[in-house]
Image (tube, helix red, strand yellow):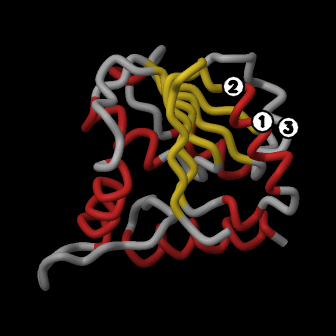
Amino acid sequence: MLNFFYIIINRGYKLVFGNNYMLHAPLFLKVDDTLFDAQCHFSAHCLSFLPSLRGKRILDIGCGNGMLARYILKTYDPSFIYGVDIVAHQIDIAKINIEKDQEGRILFAVDDAQLLSTVGNQQFDIVICIESALHYPDKNRFLSQVKRVLAPGRIFSYSGSP
């Protein structure tokens, strides 16, 4: 069901707007904001609570089609960003959209947020999860994986419904 939902959303955005878009809520700040502008505003708002992302290793859990990860890479200059999502179709889209200058600094993989089997212990400075945790049935298992993959004293940022 989740797979089907995101296939439809991505196809809808492609059909209506001619492009892939982030799959989280928009934050319209001006009347003439485009959907992409509004999604960037929402992303910037969520990330504004974090210290500088420059030079950091970031894990984006529930990365969807990778648009947020690519936005973060372009805007905040982390050293590396790794996006995981359980929906293989989403990861396929994310991989197709990696730009040449992003290669080696951004990777995507199919992985379950409650397992994070593709991620080693204490690998990341910052873990973000924006509007995807509502899909994780076992929140305790998810949070224990976040704790496992974060380097000591590092940051977890969550946005969305429980």
Say which of 65 and 25 sits in front.
Answer: 25
**Picture quarter containing residue 108?**
top right
Q: Amino acid at mark 1?
A: Gln
- In terms of depth relative to the viewer, which is nearer, 14 or 51? 51
For label 1, the crowd category at 10 Å Cα-Cα, with few meaning under 14, some 14 to 19 and many 20 or more, is some
* In the rendered image, the vertical position of residue 1 relative to residue 97, given as above or below: below
Residue shown at 76% from the left, 64% from the top: 135
Residue 94 placed where, x, y %? 56, 42
Secondary structure type for disc 1: helix
Report the residue marked by disc 1: 145
Instruction: Determine the CA span between mark 1 and mark 3.
Output: 6 Å
Pinpoint residue 62: horizontal percent, then vertical percent: 64, 50
The reply to whether callout 1 and callout 3 are in contact (CB within 8 Å) is yes
Q: Residue at x 45, y 40 (%)?
A: 69
Q: Amino acid at mark 2?
A: Val
Residue occupying the point 79% across, 38% down? 144
Write down the residue under mark 3: 115
Residue 126 percent location from the top left of the image: 50, 31
Q: Of residues 18 and 128, which is closer to you in this image?
A: 128
Depicted 109 relative to depicted 41: above or below: above
Q: CA distance from mark 2 to mark 3?
A: 11 Å
Q: Which comes before the other along the chain, label 1 or label 3?
A: 3
Residue at left offset 57%, top offset 66%: 10
Q: Which residue does the numbered mark 2 point to in the structure image?
A: 149
